[in-house]
Amino acid sequence: MKTVVGLAVILMFVAGCSTTQEMAIKDAQSPAICGFLGNPACAELTKGGEGQAGLRWINPQAKLTQYNKAIVTVVGFFGADASKVSPKEQEQLTALFQTSLTEALSKRYQIVDEPGPGVMRIQVAILDAEAATPGLRSISMVVPQARLLSTITRGIIGRYPFVGGGEAAVKIMDSMTGEMLVAAVDRRVGGGSIKTAATWEWGDAERVIKEWSQLASDRLYAYTSGTAKP
């Protein structure tokens, strides 16, 4: 028992400040992922490293440093799992993603509406979204005994109980030729930060969307600015 409690305490400190948590993609070759990304991206996805999406593909022939503008489109929910979310909530989450991603990218790129030289076409699909269980989510984060049990649960199943989250895919193409440049898939759920305790049903999904937006902006700019190799 001491060993279990000790592990739980360690996990609290390791994950306690995180508002979201990256999860492994259940099926890299799922119909939703492959249907949205197409080939060769789907067939050649590889595991991302620290600070990257869970799965990624980059065209080895692409000259990413030539791009400084972007057309940004969040196409909405894609795939069979979309039916779990009501049309109204799909619309709200899609609108949030469009706004959040556009704002994050606009700090580094000129956002445009028409194809042209140096313009990337960025398309994002939400493949899945999970709602949190608000009351139990709060109790599991705030009440010490419940938090301990939640942390133990995370150590066993890899995530906290009662959290929400989602999965999304992105494909980036040359706006004029349609050549695929970059593709990625990522899955995240709510983390263990006390700041996430008082969350509404889709609060974790919203935090995940905002983190995806920042992650996409950071990684893409690192490649197009030449400060990091793809």
Image (spheres, rainbow, N blue to C red):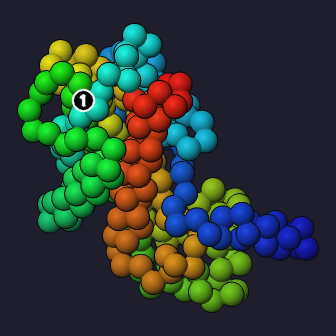
Q: Which of 53 and 89 is in front in this view?
A: 53
- Which residue bears the numbered disc 1? 120
Q: Which of 120 and 180 is in front in this view?
A: 120
As displayed, is residue 63 above or below residue 93? above
Kind of residue sitting beneath label 1: Met
Residue 156: % across, % down: 69, 59
Residue 212: % across, % down: 40, 51
Toward the bottom, the furthest residue is 143
Q: Quadrant of residue 49?
A: top right
Asked whether residue 19 is in view, the answer is yes
Residue 84 appears left or right of 187: left
Q: Quadrant of residue 21?
A: bottom right
As displayed, is residue 128 above or below residue 121? below
Toward the right, the furthest residue is 2
Asked whether residue 46 is in view, the answer is no
Q: Residue at x 88, y 73 (%)?
A: 1
Q: What element carries label 1?
A: strand
As displayed, is residue 37 above or below residue 7? above
Q: Which residue is drawn at 59% across and 60% down?
A: 159
Q: Which residue is drawn at 23% across and 25% down?
A: 118
Residue 60 appears left or right of 88: right
Toward the left, the furthest residue is 114
Residue 214 appears left or right of 15: left
Residue 223: % across, % down: 45, 30
